[in-house]
Amino acid sequence: MIDRAFDSLYNQSIGFENLEIIFIDDCSNDNSKEKILNYSKKYGNVIGVYLNENSGFAGKPRNEGLKYATADYIMFLDPDDYYLEDACETLYDKITTENVDLVSGNFCLDNESNIHSWNHVNITDEIKVTNIEEKPSLLLLAPSIWTKIYKRKFILENEIKFDENLPGQDALFLYYALIHANGIIFMNKVLVVYCKRDYNKIKEKSITDNKTYKRLSDYLNVYEKMYHVLNNYNNELVIAVSSHFSYWSNLLKNSDIPTPEKINLIHTFQELLRKTNSYLTADNELIQLLIPIQMNTIINILNIQNEDLEKKMLNNFDVTERYQQKIIELNNKLYIENKKNKTKTI
């Protein structure tokens, strides 16, 4: 897989020799280490870093890469994904011309049978803001750190790092970057092909697809950290964390975790949902976008096929449904206010 990533770097229109390329070998069990050694011997701008033991998550290798980086700008790429040939040039030209801290492109999904665009927010061309408060819906975009370019000075000065012991560290990293960035640009142009593994053909599962109690609990820990990041910045943005809840609840629904552990996870989740919905206001632009996600989350949990779970949790889950009703009421209020304003304008 590393060959595909390297080839896409080698074929960049900006010129391969203009790139500082750092490969981190996280004790891979294939021949990636040998390939990195060969690349670093052959090309002076390729650096190989070899960890002593597998970290289990992508956070540590990415942090190691940040330590070795000397260029003014930073990009990330996973070994099984690849850039389109104008990716580096497009991002570099935009961030240097506009002098902002963060520029993002878009990506498409390659599932080995077709490629299609993946865009979670309705963006037709380009969005440019001074800070995330001007466009909070950018918090709902997929946490694709590899579609972006960052000022290295900005990353270092704000001490933005990846959490090394949890899944979902890319989303947490991006939250830190978005709330600190002085200037954010999103271009609705596909620059990266994200290669999703076909688990019907391979035995190895991605960390993100594991459905163990620990994995699901780890995700809730990440969401809790994301909540605190946004709450310390602007508490009206904390509802953005719930954009991840549908994914989590789907993992829970399809897991074989024993009932007592599922109950424990749902209790923890309920408390997190309560906190993320604590600062809702009728003019919060995130409400309309998040209603379907929160509704789907509730449905996933209530559809868990387990009689013991239903007996113990359904009454308790009335609390969660009340928070859901609050969202709907606020959204209706927002709709009515918008309609009145339009009538006044006419």
Image (cartoon, rainbow, N blue to C red):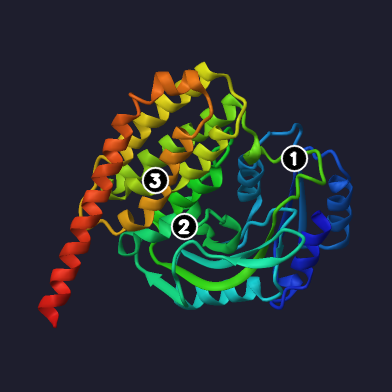
Could you tell which of marks 1 and 2 lies nearer the N-terminus? Answer: 1
110 relative position to 183: left or right: right
Expressed as whole percent of the image width and height from the top left, the position of residue 259 reads 53, 19
Please tell me the numbered disc located at residue 295.
3
Please tell me the numbered disc located at residue 154.
2
Q: Which residue is farthest front?
A: 307
Callout 1: 10 Å neighbours few (<14), some, many (20+)?
Answer: many
Expressed as whole percent of the image width and height from the top left, the position of residue 246 reads 48, 44
26 relative position to 67: left or right: right
**Which image quarter is the C terminus in?**
bottom left
Q: Nearer the viewer, residue 129 or 340?
A: 340
Please tell me whether mark 3 or mark 2 is closer to you in this view.
3
Could you tell which of marks 1 and 3 lies nearer the N-terminus? Answer: 1
Say if 47 sits above or below 225 in the image.
below
Expressed as whole percent of the image width and height from the top left, the position of residue 64 reads 65, 44
Q: Secondary structure at mark 3?
A: helix
- Which residue type carries mark 2? Phe
Task: Look at 85% across and 45% down and name the residue there.
Answer: 33
Please tell me the numbered disc located at residue 334.
none
- Which residue type carries mark 3? Met
Say if 231 sits above or below 214 in the image.
below
Location of mark 1 (residue): 26
Expressed as whole percent of the image width and height from the top left, the position of residue 19 reads 70, 67
Task: Look at 44% across and 38% down and name the residue there.
Answer: 223
Could you tell which of marks 3 and 2 lies nearer the N-terminus? Answer: 2
Quarter of the figure with residue 1: bottom right
Q: CA distance from mark 3 to mark 2?
A: 37 Å
- Which residue type carries mark 1? Asp
Q: CA distance from mark 1 to mark 3?
A: 39 Å
Callout 2: 10 Å neighbours few (<14), some, many (20+)?
Answer: some
